[in-house]
Image: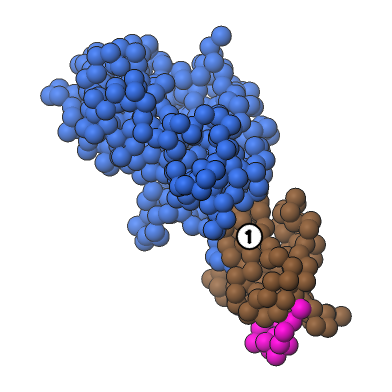
C-alpha cells in the first residue's frame, strides 16, 4: 500500500491561501498543494459523494486560486482587438454581458493557457479568468502583447466561488434574485449589501451553475450563506476533476500544453469564423491548416471495458498492438459508472466506436473511442 | 479465533491454521478514499513476502498491495469485482482481497499486532 494521493505540485512552505482557507479547515477538508495554493482535495463526504451531490443538487467550490483580471482600455473595441492578437476567438462580436471561451496561443500555434473572456455588462471593457497554474505566465504574456494605452489589472482582491448543479439556480436566486435571468455563458453585476458581485452562468462540471467573483473580505460570509442552504455541500478538487472529465472538458497542463494546438485539443468550436478566414492570431498558419486538412492527432474520449482506470501518460494501442497515442486524463467516474479517459490518437482512429486498448500495468485493456461529453451537459442555454 | 497481523504498508493478514486472509486496513481505505477497482492475484500464484500481489485503485490513484507473507494464492474475493466499495464499507472483513496458503509461518513473527499497528499508523499520520 502506498500513501494517499497527492497533487503533482510538490509541497512548499510558501503555499498561498485563499480567503476560504479557514472555512475549509473548519469543514474538515483534506488540504493539498495545488498550483501553489493550499486547496481542498475533498471534505468529509469524499470524492464520490461530492461528485454525485453536484450532479443531483448543488455544490460549492472554492476556485479563488484562478487568476482574475481586467483589461483597462479606452473602449471595448480596443480591448477586443488586443485580445484577438493573442487568441483565436472572435471577441469583437461579443455582446455586453456575454462570455467566450478561448485560448492564448503561441507563435507555433500551441496553447499557452485556456481562459474565459467576459465583456462586462456595461459593454465597456473585458475581464479574464485564467488557470491558477498559469496566471503569472499568462499575465506576463498578455502584458507583453498589449499595445500602448491598454493595461492588464490582476484582481487578487477578489475571490471566486462556483456553485454548480441542477439546484444551483434555485439556491442562488433565493439569495440574489435576478441571477436566474442569466443564461449559460452570460454575466451580470449584482449588488449585495452595496458590494458588487460579478456573476457568470458558467462552470467546469457540465452542470448548470454560476461562478461568483466576490471581494475577498466578503467571500467567507457568502460561502457560509450558500452552505447554509439545504441543497448545498462543499466540493473539493477531487470531485471537480471527475466532474470535468465526465463533461469532456480539458484540463490545462494535463490534456493540453504549449505543444498542443486548439484543433488537436478538440477546441475548434471556439475559433470564430471570421478568425478562420482572416487569421491575425499567433500560430494562425498551423491552426488554419489544421482546420482544413486535419491535425496530426486529436483529443478523443475513451471508454474502457473493465474498471481499471486509464491514467495520465499510459499508452494507447491499436488492435494490432501498435502504440498510437497516450492518455492525458482518466478515472473510474461515478456518473458514467465506467472507466473513462481522454487521449490523443491519430484522426483516423478518432471515429467513435474505434476499438483500441490502454496499456495498464503491462496489460492491454480493451477500450473504444466514444463521443464526449461522457455525461450529457445540463446547461441553461438561451432558448 | 484467528490471529491478525499487520504490515507497515497497511495490509492485514488474518491467520487461521496454515491459511491467511489478506486485505488492506480500515485506516488504509480511509486514506485512499472511494475505491473504484481492485486487481487481485490469480489462484495458484506463488508470492514472496513483500511482493506486489495486486492493485487497489481509488478515484485519484492506484496503489500496490503487497503480500505480508510468502505462499500460494488459494482464493480471491469475487465480491470485489463488481463491488470494490466493499473495501470502504468493511475493509477488515467483507472487503478482504485474497487468501494465501502460508509457506513459512515464521514470517508472521516479523509483523505487527493490532496495538503495534494502531500506534504505528497514528505516528505516521503525525
Asked whether, in this view, residue A291 is left or right of residue A84, the answer is right
The part of the chain drawn in magenta is B101-120
The chain in brown: B
Dot 1: what SS?
strand
Rendered residue at 24%/34% (across/down) = A108
Residue carrying label 1: B56
Question: The C terminus of chain A appears in which quarter of the rendering?
Answer: top right
Q: Where is residue A74 in the image (x, y as percent from the top left)?
A: 20, 16
Chain A, chosen colour in render: blue
Rendered residue at 56%/69% (across/down) = B125
Q: Nearer the viewer, residue A146 or A257?
A: A257
Colour scheme used in the picture? by chain
Direction right: furthest residue? B1
When asked about the image quadrant of residue A56, the answer is top right
Does the magenta segment cover residue B111?
Answer: yes
Direction left: furthest residue? A148
Rendered residue at 53%/52% (across/down) = A359
Q: Where is residue A364 in the image (x, y as percent from the top left)?
A: 57, 51
Rendered residue at 30%/40% (across/down) = A258
Residue A248 appearing in the image: yes
When asked about the image quadrant of residue B124, the answer is bottom right
Does the magenta segment cover residue B2?
Answer: no
Residue A115 appearing in the image: no
Asked whether, in this view, residue B88 is left or right of residue A300, the answer is right
Residue A228's place in the image compared with A317, above or below, is: above
Amino acid at each position: 500500500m502506498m500513501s494517499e494521493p497527492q497533487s503533482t505540485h510538490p509541497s512548499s512552505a510558501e503555499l498561498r491561501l485563499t480567503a476560504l482557507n479557514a472555512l475549509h479547515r473548519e469543514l474538515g477538508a483534506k488540504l493539498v498543494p495545488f498550483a501553489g495554493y493550499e486547496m481542498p482535495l475533498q471534505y468529509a463526504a469524499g470524492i464520490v459523494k461530492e461528485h454525485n451531490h453536484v450532479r443531483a443538487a448543488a455544490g460549492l467550490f472554492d476556485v479563488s486560486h484562478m487568476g482574475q483580471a481586467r483589461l483597462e482600455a479606452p473602449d471595448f473595441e480596443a480591448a477586443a482587438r488586443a485580445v484577438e492578437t493573442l487568441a483565436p476567438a472572435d471577441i469583437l462580436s461579443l455582446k455586453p454581458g456575454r462570455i467566450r471561451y478561448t485560448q492564448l496561443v503561441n507563435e507555433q500555434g500551441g496553447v499557452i493557457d485556456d481562459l474565459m473572456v467576459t465583456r462586462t455588462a456595461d459593454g465597456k471593457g473585458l475581464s479574464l479568468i485564467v488557470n491558477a497554474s498559469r496566471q503569472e505566465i499568462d499575465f506576463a504574456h498578455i502584458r507583453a502583447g498589449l499595445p500602448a494605452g491598454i493595461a492588464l489589472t490582476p484582481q487578487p482582491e477578489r475571490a471566486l466561488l462556483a456553485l454548480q448543479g441542477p439546484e444551483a439556480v434555485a439556491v442562488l436566486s433565493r439569495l440574489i434574485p435576478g441571477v436566474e435571468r442569466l443564461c449559460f455563458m452570460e454575466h451580470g453585476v449584482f449588488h449585495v449589501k452595496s458590494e458588487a458581485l460579478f456573476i457568470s452562468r458558467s462552470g467546469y462540471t457540465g452542470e448548470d451553475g454560476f461562478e461568483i467573483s466576490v471581494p475577498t473580505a466578503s467571500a467567507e460570509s457568502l460561502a457560509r450563506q450558500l452552505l447554509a442552504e439545504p441543497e448545498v455541500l462543499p466540493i473539493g478538487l477531487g470531485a471537480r476533476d471527475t466532474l470535468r472529465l465526465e463533461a469532456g472538458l480539458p484540463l490545462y497542463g494535463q490534456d493540453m500544453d504549449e505543444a498542443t494546438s486548439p484543433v488537436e485539443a478538440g477546441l475548434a468550436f471556439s475559433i470564430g469564423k471570421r478568425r478562420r478566414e482572416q487569421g491575425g492570431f499567433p500560430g494562425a498558419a498551423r491552426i488554419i491548416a489544421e482546420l482544413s486538412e486535419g491535425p496530426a492527432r486529436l483529443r478523443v474520449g475513451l471508454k474502457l471495458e473493465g474498471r481499471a482506470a486509464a491514467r495520465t501518460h499510459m499508452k494507447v494501442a491499436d488492435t494490432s498492438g501498435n502504440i498510437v497515442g497516450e492518455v492525458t486524463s482518466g478515472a473510474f467516474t461515478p456518473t458514467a459508472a465506467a472507466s473513462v479517459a481522454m487521449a490523443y490518437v491519430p484522426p483516423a482512429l478518432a471515429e467513435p466506436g474505434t476499438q483500441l486498448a490502454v496499456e495498464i500495468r503491462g496489460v492491454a485493456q480493451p477500450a473504444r473511442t466514444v463521443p464526449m461529453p461522457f455525461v450529457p451537459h445540463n446547461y441553461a442555454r438561451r432558448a | 479465533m484467528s490471529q491478525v497481523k499487520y504490515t507497515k504498508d497497511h495490509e492485514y493478514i488474518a491467520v487461521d491454521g496454515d491459511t491467511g486472509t489478506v486485505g488492506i486496513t480500515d485506516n488504509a481505505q480511509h486514506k485512499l478514499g472511494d475505491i473504484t477497482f481492485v486487481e487481485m492475484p490469480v489462484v495458484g500464484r506463488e508470492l514472496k513476502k513483500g511482493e506486489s500481489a495486486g492493485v487497489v485503485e481509488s478515484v485519484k490513484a492506484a496503489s500496490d498491495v503487497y503480500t505480508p507473507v510468502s505462499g500460494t494464492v488459494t482464493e480471491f474475493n469475487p465480491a470485489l469485482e463488481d463491488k470494490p466499495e466493499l473495501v470502504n464499507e468493511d475493509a477488515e472483513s467483507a472487503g478482504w482481497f485474497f487468501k494465501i496458503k502460508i509457506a513459512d509461518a515464521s514470517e508472521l513473527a516479523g509483523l505487527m499486532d493490532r496495538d503495534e499497528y494502531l500506534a504505528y499508523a497514528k505516528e505516521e499520520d503525525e
